[in-house]
Amino acid sequence: MLTLPASYSAEAVECLYEVIENLTLNGARCQVIYDSQATRAAVIEADATDECGEMRHPVLAVLEMERVTSINTVLRIKSFWTESDGMQAKVEQGSLAKALYKALTLKKQITLVGL
């Protein structure tokens, strides 16, 4: 079973991820972030919140992918996860999936293939 954090530290987002899109979903300022090394993309809340003295970005959705060829722009979808608690529940899964797909295909020229 895949267990993912419900938030990413602001430091991790800055060091590991590239912000490829800023958008508003259901009134929440969000970012689509991409890690080319781990072939992972996520939708996070743009505004970090203090959790036990550490600034963290709540995660709304994560898309895990894998390379299927030597071409780095063709990726297979491994899993798609959404947070179902709190504010995240107000944003529909379809909106999150569409935001990830659009940002990856338009901003990174990535071709996504199904499972």
Image (cartoon, grey):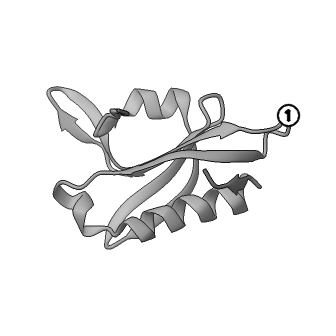
Q: Residue furthest right?
A: 70
Q: Residue 17: image x %, image y %?
A: 55, 36
Q: Residue furthest bottom?
A: 26
Q: Residue 63: image x %, image y %?
A: 50, 47
Secondary element at image label 1? loop
Question: Residue, x 20% and y 36% (percent of image)?
Answer: 50
Q: Nearer the viewer, residue 37 or 79?
A: 79
Question: Residue, x 64% and y 55% (percent of image)?
Answer: 114
Q: Residue 60: image x %, image y %?
A: 35, 53
Q: Which residue is mark 1?
A: 70
Q: Residue 18: image x %, image y %?
A: 59, 40
Question: Residue, x 38% and y 65% (percent of image)?
Answer: 93
Up the image or down, 49 lies above or below 16; here it is below
In the drawing, does residue 85 fall left or right of residue 79? left
Q: How many marks?
A: 1
Q: Nearer the viewer, residue 73 or 106?
A: 73
Quarter of image, res 94? bottom left
User: Which quadrant is home to the N terminus?
Assistant: top left
> In the image, what residue type sits under mark 1?
Ser
Up the image or down, 80 lies above or below 102; here it is above
In the drawing, does residue 81 fall left or right of residue 102? left
Structural crowding at the residue carrying mark 1, measured as other residues with C-alpha within 10 Å and reported as few (<14), some (14–19) or many (≥20)? few
Q: Nearer the viewer, residue 21 or 7?
A: 7
